[in-house]
Image (tube, coloured by chain):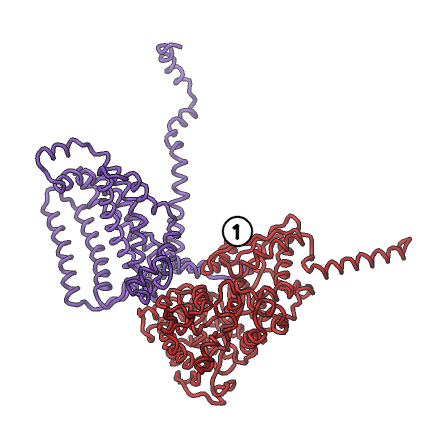
Amino acid sequence: MSRYPARTLVIAVGVGLLAAACNASNSTSTGNFSGTTIRIVTFTGPQIAEPLQRRGPDFEKATGAKVQVITVPFSDLYQKILTDFSTKTNSYDAMVFDPQWMGDYVPSGYLEDLTNRVQNDTALQWNDIAPFFRDFSATFKGKVYTVPLDGDFQMVYYRTDLLQKDGLQPPATWDDYISIAKHFQGKDLNGDGKADFGSCWAMKRSAQSYWMFISVAAAFLQSQGTKQGSFFDTSNMQPLMNNAGTAAALDIYKQLSKLGPPDQLNNDVGDSRGLFVTGRCALSLDWGDIGPLAVDKSQSKVADQVGAVILPGSKKVLDRASGQLVDCNSTICPYAVNGVNHSPFAAFGGWSGAINKAAPAKTKDAAFAFLSYMSQPAQSSVDVTIGKTGFNPYRTSHFTNLGPWTASGMSEKAAKDYLGAIQASLQSPNMVLDMRIPQTAFYQQTALDTALAQFLAGELSANQTMAQITNQWNSKTDELGRQSQLDAYKSSLSVTK
Amino acid sequence: MSGEASARQVPVAASRRSPLVARLDRSAGAVFILPAVLVILAFSIFPLLASLYVSMTRLSFSEGGIHLTYVGFGNYAKLLVGIDRTHFLGVTVPLTPLTAVVLLVIYGGFAFLLVRYLRGPGRTVAGFVGRLVTAVIAGALVWLVVDTVMTSGRPGTIVVTLIYVGVDVSAQYLLALGLALLVVQRLPGRRFFRVVFLLPMMITPVGVAYLFRMLTDTSKGPLYPLWAHFGLTDVSWVTNPWGARLAVMIGDVWQWTPFIFIVLLASIESLPIELNEAAVVDGANRWQMFWAITFPQILPATSTVVLIRLIEAFKIVDLPNVLTNGGPGTATESLTLHAYTIWRALDIGGSAAVAYMLLIVVTFVGISYVNLFRRRVTAMA
């Protein structure tokens, strides 16, 4: 016992209050990391890299840790990280990546288990992150490996002014979508005297086209809830890529390739977003990025003229027993709305930050502090309203607190419309989960992407495309072990929403 | 010390050398060569053998790291007869009368050359076997090109690469020769153009690819007024297979013509002027002077620069990767891009197998070119 218990108590309380005050005023003060450099790899910006680069200096001022952001093209990111891990080069301390790749990174033991860290970090407000993102984007086999920084759903965007003027309703089905796209194709939509486009999609090879295709196909392939899955039969791991549902989706995909700009097959999301916000397209399919980009007056010509809806659906769905399309009814489409089966696609899952298990202990602490700082509501609620960040809402507070949205220039109505479309997707019992099994990159980025590009280019017919995807997926599944892949797939479908 | 004195001392010094020193002296040659041999082993032979082994494996991920499983020729089988066959070799269809005639003419040419060699004075068994092997492999490649390009079939990455090599190197050589002949004339501003013609070679290939991506975009970009004037804004180069290949080839020709140009220019400028002066006195016209005097004298330089460009052209990757990502479909995908695409999904065994197939084709073309063309040309010169 101290000789001066009262004085000691006063000092201790004083220090405690001071620390609490500091913590309240600056939520990054989770440690002193002077002399530490965090090397974070992510994809070539500006999206995703931009907020990391912008907030890095602020974090350095608060904690002393220097943030070095290394960027590589998206198509190289998966193998760059994995090569760095497997060769034990360990040149990256942390990475902001596609959570689908956890299927390869976690079993190999490359990622730091963050379970205890997220539970002990009150500033992170873990429970404010929507359950789906905590589970799908952050958790693998019961342990937390990433900190979500982004929430991803694909939605359809439309020009409210154009549809209103012509008395059209936003598309509820893919047939509606095509009908509206045809209606506006070739008309001048932004008053510059040039013919514009009914629909603008990213259909370039080695970019984002396969997510766009799955957004269409899912409406036909999955109707009985999230656990049914859209990629494989959960009884035998046979691909769901060679049936009447996929054929219908390919037909729509092909039609849409002709209802857009002439070089649509060479457009990625950067191109399609640019075309949409400059008023050249009536419709588009994208993640949440178009919402904030549309109110960015430095580049947008369609501010407050953009609406968003949940992905269109289908009145016919695949009967997996017969392989044929059947009309929706309450048995086969239990979650249909007005007879339309909607299957909102959580494409990609949202960019998430992870830490290299082999990094030095102090660097791992600093890296976690930075990821936490980026995700905390004070930072993320602003970042998700800025189009160039590439971050979309993923916390409950992002949906309930409209202040940052209206401050960004979005009207309250537009904000509610935009956030409502995301929430409708997030709350759907028939939400489609993206693939997250070992070597997902091969299944999607190589096999599916190449076959779709060949189909759009006319190199393959619809039947040849479906057969090629099925053969390549089956070949990879057999290589890796059908049962282990099936277990991984079923496990990936068991997420909390 | 005088030279005479030192000469007298040499036998004495030699007789005093220890056996160790004598042994070192004997192996001095090997010791001096050893560093070079080690460098070659480390940086050429070892990677070559290691990648050969990798091409016969399959990568998988397991607890604690990666695991390579030996699969023999499985990755090669995928390319030649398996699920990647149409991607690699293309889609072949039954021959049409036209393609059958074309193949017969080409194969007839091969047969004629072989018979001529057999009847010639310098024939040897080794020479005949070499030519026979060349004819068989060349025949197979020609069949692949004719049957996938001149029919309703579809060229695979190997044929697309051969098209790039054939068209690009030919066009680059003809353009470079024309420019070099132009620049050696005493025209105003020739020094300026000599520098300007070299500029494309100085630009990084990725930069050239982005430049051509902008130029070929008919809906916007610097050439938009031109496309609009001709009503071509609704036409896309890069969504049509041959339009996209043409865009890639134009970019490659634009970038690498300067390399051939500078070599040919140096060669032409170093030629003695006396032969041309004598030809003028004899009344030869410009074409006769070029064909009978200049061209034969630049053949050694031509053969060397074409060989270098042939080998380099096989490795084209930046332009199709940035300009079209190998699309539309796989229409512009070269062998290197094919290997890179597979490698991105970390199928390093499959990627190494594609790289080895490329190595085989390049080696075959290079050796055939040297044996059948370059040596003859050099000897003639």
Q: Position of residue B208 (x, y in %)?
A: 36, 52
Chain under disc 1: A
Q: Residues within 10 Å of mark 1 (few under 14, many from 20)?
A: few
Image quadrant in which the N terminus of chain B is located: top left
Residue extending furthest right? A3
Quadrant in the picture for residue B41: top left
Say which of A3 and A301 sits in front. Answer: A301
Q: Is residue A371 above or below residue A347?
A: above
Image quadrant in which the C terminus of chain B is located: top left
Say which of A201 and A131 sits in front. Answer: A201
Q: Judging from the image, what is the letter of the chain drawn in red?
A: A
Mark 1 sits on what residue?
A: A89
Left-right relation of A438 to A204: right
| Residue occupying the point 64% across, 60% down | A373
| Residue occupying the point 26% across, 37% down | B266
Left-right relation of B41 to B247: right
Q: Where is residue A369 in the image (x, y as percent from the top left)?
A: 64, 58
Q: In this view, does A24 lie above or below A158?
A: above
Q: Judging from the image, what is the letter of the chain drawn in purple?
A: B
Q: Position of residue A251 (x, y in %)?
A: 36, 77
Q: In this view, does A173 lie above or below A93?
A: below
SS class, disc 1: loop
Say which of A439 and B28 sits in front. Answer: A439
Q: Where is residue B142 in the image (x, y as percent from the top left)?
A: 21, 58
Residue extending furthest bottom? A330
Examine the rendering and report whether any part of residue A468 can be seen: yes
